[in-house]
Amino acid sequence: MGITESVAQAEKDVLVKLVMDAFRRIIVHYGAWFSEVEHQIGMANALEVEKEVWDASLSNQITRLGATLGFGVEGGVPAALKALPREALIDLIEKVGINWLANDGIWFQAVERNFGMADAKRCNDTCWTRFSPFEASRIKSLLNLPEHGGIPALKEALTYRMYAFINKQSIEDVNEGCIIFRMNDCRVQAARKRKGLSDYPCKSAGLVEYPYFAKTIDPRIETVCIGCPPDEHPDDWFCAWKFTLAGE
């Protein structure tokens, strides 16, 4: 065994904390690898490498944990997860989406608290240059969308985003090559509204988030912002975006 004597003799509560901290280190190390590969050899290459890495890494980790903790594994997935009924899986997906948004907000607030709003917004906007194409790539793979699926592929992909699990959104068909996407109810903005606060000015992030997502689904798709805070908007949506297939 490679466990050091100091770890082997540690108190049980320290060992429990160490297990949780080890998962934390894996998550951060995984993200650091992705970020650096993207920086060194480009986003497209990083996305392809990550597909290979995830399958191998997840299989190793789940299989080893299953054997250690005594839970079954089927096809690289905990058997208990596969055994859940549809309703429970749908509820779980929503809760995971809420956790994702909370995690995002905690990061933003920590940077804002320590370094100010400008730095927090800059970090947030830059994160979207990586997360948005990553999320689009994962959805594209999950749904087996074609490389140049056009507007139909984008319409389907938009319904599988993390935001789609927790916000209310709608899509209007303008024609075969154009849609208008509206975020009708946004968890973040709705919470601010309940507190009597003005809209969070998220347009700078949206101008990265939506074009990067659409271009990853199909590089021919152009994105135009119709409105996004701090822009004025009607009561029935917070932001709206027009997606058009080039040449349509």
Image (cartoon, grey):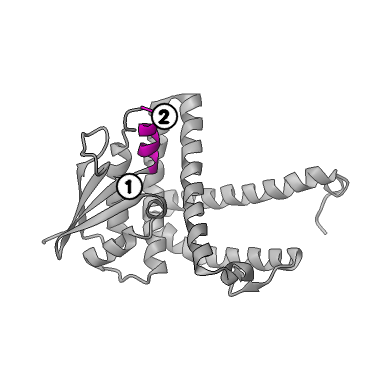
Q: Which residues are the magenta region?
A: 187-196
Quarter of the image that includes the C terminus = bottom left
Please state which amino acid type lies under the numbered disc 2. Answer: Asp
Q: In the image, what residue type sits under mark 1? A: Glu
Q: Most prominent secondary structure in the magenta stretch?
A: helix
| Residue 72 left/right relative to 37 | right
Quadrant in which the N terminus is drawn? bottom right
In this view, 198 is above or below 180? above
Q: Position of residue 107 (x, y in %)?
A: 50, 37
Badge nearest the viewer, 2 or 1: 1
Find the distance from the CA under tag 2 to the CA under tag 1.
18 Å
* Residue nearest the observer in this picture, 45 or 129: 129
Q: Residue at x 58, y 75 (%)?
A: 75
Instruction: Classify 10 Å Cα crowding around label 2: few (below 14), some (14-19), many (20 and above).
Output: some
Q: Quadrant of residue 61?
A: bottom right
* Image point (63%, 71%), residue name: 79
In the picture of the structure, the residue carrying the numbered disc 2 is: 119
Is residue 13 rendered to the left or right of residue 91? right
Q: Which image quadrant for residue 59? A: bottom right
Q: Which residue is mark 1?
A: 209
Query: Residue pushed farthest left?
Result: 248
Q: Is residue 188 above or below residue 176?
A: above
